[in-house]
């Protein structure tokens, strides 16, 4: 019998939290993916999907969720320069590393990241520190685009990768509603979930 997901994204979020608390990060990712399907315009859910996909080593899903997160954030209070920079860093590192992503997909993501970085000043007013970071990221992207590699030690890359997308919990989301997990399980079992 296949698991029937509720159509209410908050209930799905509770299920994802439960899976994650049990250490079942792949099930959590699958469940968050369902929440994204029900509520695709949620930046916070896209961010959560990117974070859990990153934990699971699912680079394509993580990068695509980050891309959607940045696109949606352009006109939202949840968008940030840091999200732009995190996406650019993640794509740049993926292009440097030997990741299992089809070349055309990675090239498209790299082009998108480059375009987003070039236009970040039209979306946000940058501080001097952010302008310096933007310039450094632009340099890094130019180096990688020309076939060069970045001068980041592998251990530093690992540390840097962890900070790109920090998984968020449902407590950080706007719709922080408490649901009894037993009730959600009963609804799922009965097939009466919204």
Image (cartoon, grey):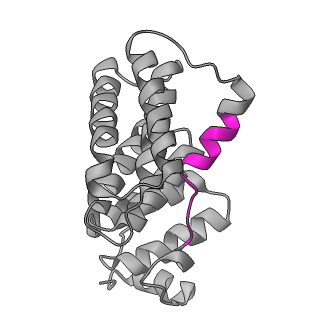
Q: Nearer the viewer, residue 92 or 188?
A: 92
Number of on-image labels: 0
Q: Nearer the viewer, residue 114 or 48?
A: 114
The answer to whether residue 179 is seen in the rendering is yes
User: Residue 67, how many percent across, how many down?
Assistant: 34, 47
User: Residue 167, how many percent across, how many down?
Assistant: 57, 59
Q: Is residue 147 above or below residue 82?
A: above
Apparent side of residue 28 relative to residue 111 in the rendered image (left or right): right
Quadrant the N terminus occupies: bottom left
Q: Is residue 148 magenta?
A: no
User: Residue 30, how many percent across, how many down?
Assistant: 44, 55
Apparent side of residue 158 relative to residue 99 in the rendered image (left or right): right
Looking at this rendering, what residue extends furthest in the right direction? 155
Q: Quadrant of residue 77?
A: bottom left
Quadrant the C terminus occupies: bottom left
Name the residue located 68 percent from the left edge and 34 percent from the top edge.
Answer: 158
Q: Is residue 51 above or below residue 110?
A: below
Name the residue located 54 percent from the left edge and 49 percent from the top edge.
Answer: 129
Q: Quadrant of residue 34?
A: bottom left
Name the residue located 39 percent from the left edge and 59 percent from the top edge.
Answer: 46
Q: Which residues are magenta?
A: 158-169
């Amino acid at each position: 019998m296949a698991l029937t997901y509720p159509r209410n994204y908050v209930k799905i979020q509770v299920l994802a939290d439960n899976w994650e608390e049990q250490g079942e990060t792949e099930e959590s990712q699958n469940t968050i993916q369902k929440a994204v399907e029900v509520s695709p315009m949620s930046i916070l859910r896209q961010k959560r999907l990117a974070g859990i996909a990153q934990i699971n080593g699912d680079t394509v899903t993580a990068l695509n969720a980050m891309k959607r997160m940045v696109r949606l954030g352009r006109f939202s209070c949840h968008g940030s320069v840091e999200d732009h920079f995190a996406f650019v860093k993640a794509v740049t590192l993926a292009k440097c590393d030997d990741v299992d992503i089809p070349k055309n997909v990675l090239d498209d993501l790299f082009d998108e990241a480059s375009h987003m970085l070039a236009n970040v000043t039209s979306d946000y007013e940058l501080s001097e520190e952010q302008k310096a970071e933007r310039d450094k990221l632009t340099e890094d992207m130019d180096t990688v685009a020309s076939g060069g590699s970045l001068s980041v030690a592998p251990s530093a890359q690992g540390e840097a990768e962890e900070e790109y997308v920090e998984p968020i919990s449902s407590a950080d989301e706007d719709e922080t509603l408490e649901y009894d997990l037993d009730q959600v399980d009963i609804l799922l079992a009965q097939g009466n979930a919204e």
